[in-house]
Amino acid sequence: MKTTMKYKLTVICTLVMGMSSLMMAQDTPQLSDPEIASVAVVANQIDVDYGQVALKRSHNKEVKDFANRMIEDHNAVIKQAVALVTKLGVTPKDNAMSQSLMSQSKETLKKLNSVSSNDFDKTYIDNEVAYHEAVIGAVKNVLIPQAQNSELKDLLEAVLPALEAHLGHAKMAQGKISK
Amino acid sequence: MQTHKSLVSKYLLILAVLISFLVVLVGFKSPEDAYKPTRHTVTIFKMKFNPENLVVNKGDTVVWINKDFYQHDVTELTSKKWTSKPFNQGESWSKVITEDIKYYCDLHKVMKGNITIAK
């Protein structure tokens, strides 16, 4: 129980730190469209990776269904983003924000792979709630306002309701697992 | 030799018979003839059923069109009595409505809608 609480706090702290650095980016040079495209692809790929671990480790149908949905939907966003950058002739550009997301995800993946079987479902779903909350904040407050290309902005705006639906779905699953 | 007055009376009589015949025809129309079922459209876009609440007449058809790039389905809410199964962007699914319905997307469980039969 203590370990779970400690992990939850670590996730929240890491995400808050990540979000702070994202917000600070507004004061420093803004993200270019190729950098925003990179962040969008990385952020979606991270949740696909978490979902793959859940399919491997969970025995709970609700959790597995949720993980499958995350894999399907986030892959659909990646497909749209790749199609858009191809159409625009833009190459996604690696940047501090996507690197920060990647390094945080490595830590989370390590945790998801090592937590005990009994704690896995709760750890995964708690992380999904925290991760979607953080990504929604970043898309709403950083990526959409900074996107210059209207089609890129449209894509980010189309992704937002899905992220919010995923968060609602994750909270429903969280409620059932906590009982 | 018919007078002008009797000719008018004859035409009036024929007219009255025709009107009566039409009235009888209308009176014998079946209920199916009286109401033609309508098709209603629910658009699925940005993770919402639009409109979320729809009032239809019994026997009307509702068509759900998926305009999102995510898969969606239309599933009866209370006991999953029926489902459309997942369908992709640009695809649609329809159902004849015979009772009040509460439905949701089983893939994205926060998406919900209602169809009510007009009283």
Image (cartoon, rainbow, N blue to C red):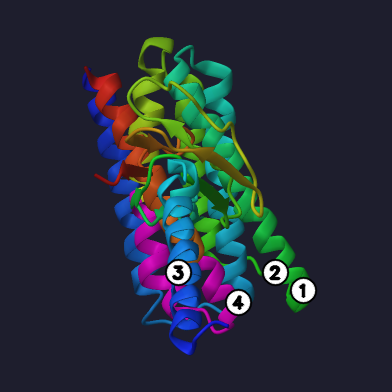
Given residues A125 and A111, the one toward you in this image is: A125
What residue is at 51 percent from the left and 81 percent from the top? B7
Please report contact status of discs 2 and 1: CB closer than 8 Å, yes or no: yes
Give the alpha-carbon distance from disc 3 to disc 4, as whole Å.
Answer: 73 Å
Mark 3 residue type: Leu
- Chain letter of the residue carrying label 4: A
Q: Tag 1, which secondary structure?
A: helix
Q: In this view, does A38 lie to the left or right of A162?
A: right
Please report contact status of discs 1 and 4: CB closer than 8 Å, yes or no: yes
For residue A87, which numbered disc appears in the image?
A: 1
- Where residue A131 appears, as percent x and y from the top left, is 39, 46
- Where residue A112 appears, as percent x and y from the top left, is 47, 27
Disc 2 or disc 3, which is closer to the eye?
Answer: 3
Ranked by sequence position, the earlier of labels 2 and 4 is 2
Q: Tag 4, which secondary structure?
A: helix
- Chain letter of the residue carrying label 2: A
Which span is picked out in magenta?
Answer: A133-156
Q: Residues within 10 Å of mark 2 (few under 14, many from 20)?
A: some
Q: Looking at the rendering, which quadrant does residue A20 occupy?
A: bottom left
Q: Residues within 10 Å of mark 4 (few under 14, many from 20)?
A: few
Image quarter (top left, top right, bottom left or bottom right) of the N terminus of chain B: bottom right
Give the alpha-carbon distance from disc 2 to disc 4, as whole Å.
Answer: 8 Å
Given residues A92 and A129, the one toward you in this image is: A129
What residue is at 64 percent from the left and 52 percent from the top? B89
Give the alpha-carbon distance from disc 2 to disc 1, as whole Å.
Answer: 5 Å
- Chain letter of the residue carrying label 1: A
Disc 3 or disc 4, which is closer to the eye?
Answer: 3
Query: Which residue position is annotated with label 3?
Result: B13
Q: Are marks 2 and 1 on the same chain?
A: yes
Mark 2 residue type: Leu
